[in-house]
Image (cartoon, grey):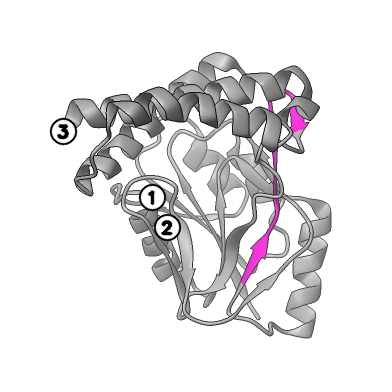
Amino acid sequence: MKITATIITLDEERNIARAIESLRCADEILIVDSGSVDRTVELARNLGARVIEANWRGYSGQKNWAAEQASHDWILSLDADEALSEALEAEIWNLKKSGPRHDAYTMPRLARYLGRWILHSGWHPDRKIRLYHRAKAKFVGDFVHESVHVEGSTGSLENNLLHFTCESLSEHVKTMERYTTLAAQEIAARQEAVPLARLLLDPPWTFFKTYVLQRGFLDGPEGLIIAHMAAFYTFLKYAKARNMS
C-alpha cells in the first residue's frame, strides 16, 4: 500500500509546512498550486514535495485532477490548513503494514478556531473520507463542500485529522463571504426557490441547533461566536441566492 498525499494550494505559505511535515507516512507528497504569489511553492519544494502548477478547476475538479497525477493509487487528500495528528499518522502506518481491507477510510476532524480546539458545535467528530483508492472513489460537488463518493466499502480510522481554521474573526468573515457566494451559486444552479420564510426562520434555527442541540455552549465564548456565524452564514447564503434568481 503506497500512498500519495495530495494538497491543492493558493497562497498557503502560513500553513503548507505544517501540512507537509505531518505526512511522513506518505510515499509521495504532491502539491497542485493554482497561482500562488507568496512562498507556497518554494516552501513545498524545499520540503521535498512534488509541485505541479495548474489552472483552477473548482474544488472537486482540482482534487480529482491531483489524484490523477499521483504516482500511487492510494490517495491521502488534505487541505493546506490541515495536518495529521501523530496518532493518526501512526494509525496510517499500521494500515500500510497490515494492508487495507476497504476502498476508502473516514477519519474524524478536530478543528482549532480562534486558538481553541472545538469539541462540540457540530464541528466534531466531523468525519471525512480523505484516504481512498482512486479507482474506487472521487470528489463530487461542483461549488462548495465537496466530498468523496465511494464505489465500494468504507472503513474508519479513529484518530484526528487536525484542522487549523480561522485565527481571527476578520479571517472568518472573509472566508464566509467567499463560501456563501459559492453556496448561493449552487442553489441558483439547481433553480431552487428560496422563500422569504426560509430567509427569516432558518438563521435562528441554525443558531439554536448549533448552540443548544449541538452543545456549542460547552465550547465557551468561541462556541457562541460559531453559532452566531453559522446563523449569519445561513442568512447570507439565502439572501445571495434570492438576489441571483
Residue range of the region highlighted in magenta in the rendering? 105-117
Quadrant where the N terminus sits is bottom right
Q: CA distance from mark 1 to mark 3?
A: 24 Å
Image: 189 above or below 40: below
Looking at the rendered structure, the number of numbered marks drawn on it comes to 3
Query: Where does the image place residue 181, in percent across and percent down from the top left?
Result: 32, 31
Q: Secondary structure at mark 2?
A: helix
Amino acid under disc 2: Lys
Among the 4 quarters of the image, the one containing residue 242: top left
Q: Secondary structure at mark 3?
A: loop
- In the image, 147: left or right of 127? left
Residue where numbered disc 2 is placed: 63
> For residue 245, which numbered disc appears in the image?
3
Towards the viewer: 80 or 227: 227
Among the 4 quarters of the image, the one containing residue 200: top left
Residue where numbered disc 1 is placed: 59
Quadrant where the C terminus sits is top left
